[in-house]
Amino acid sequence: MSDGARVIVGVSGSLHSLTALHRAAEEARVREAVLVPVLIWTPVGGERNYRARPCPPLLRAWQELAEARMERALDEAFGGLPIGVPVQPLVLRGEAAKVLPGLADRPGDLLVVSTGEQGDLRSALRRLLRRSVTRHCLNRARCGVLAVPPSTLHQDLRALHRGIDLRELAAA
């Protein structure tokens, strides 16, 4: 393993984050680095709301749910932990746009993030209303950042969900 090098990847459990997780695992293998999948969560209703009405049992339950989501993401992506690469999963409380660039603070680190949905109206509206974690990471990280676009399989899955015949896509 090379000098404590790490490949840090944001994970949410979405298809896009699983694509980024696969790419990060491959980067970690090539770089002989530790793969650090990171799932970041906030209390339901946000931090401000939680501070106004704290409830430690709920906080523990949300932490456990986040840990289960990380485990499920690793299971869905690799059937457990990926083989051939050391893995140090992290489940942290905070805002992803702040936590991820702060974690990737070593010169040899690589931060891997998903670019999320591309090209549909809903995702464009969502980006207007919410800050982009990817954009924030690209602007703030002190190491290299790899922004992973959605897999072409995502388009096929959306088409199946909408009932579009895949042969029509292939002909286009």
Image (cartoon, rainbow, N blue to C red):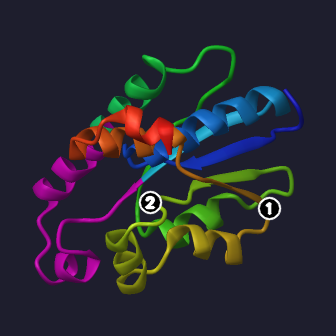
Density class for disc 1 (Cα within 10 Å; few <14, some 14-19, many ≥20) is some
Q: Which residue is labeled 1 in the image? A: 143
Mark number, residue 130: none
The answer to whether residue 55 is magenta is: yes
Magenta stretch?
A: 40-67
**x and y percent of residue 32 in the render?**
82, 28
Q: Residue at x 39, y 67 (%)?
A: 120
Q: Which quadrant of the view contains residue 163? A: top left
Q: Amino acid at mark 1?
A: Cys
Left or right for 109, reference 117: right
The residue lying toward the viewer, choosing from 78 and 90, is 78
Q: Residue at x 68, y 22 (%)?
A: 85
**x and y percent of residue 152 in the render?**
53, 42
Task: Give above or below for 49 relative to 107.
Answer: below
Determine the residue located farthest toward the front in the rendered image.
Answer: 171
Left or right for 27, reference 132: right
Q: Which quadrant of the view contains residue 58? A: bottom left
Q: Amino acid at mark 2?
A: Glu
Nearer the viewer's eye, disc 2 or disc 1?
Answer: 2
**Local secondary structure at mark 2:** loop
For the question of whether residue 151 can be seen, the reply is yes
Q: Which residue is labeled 2 in the image? A: 117
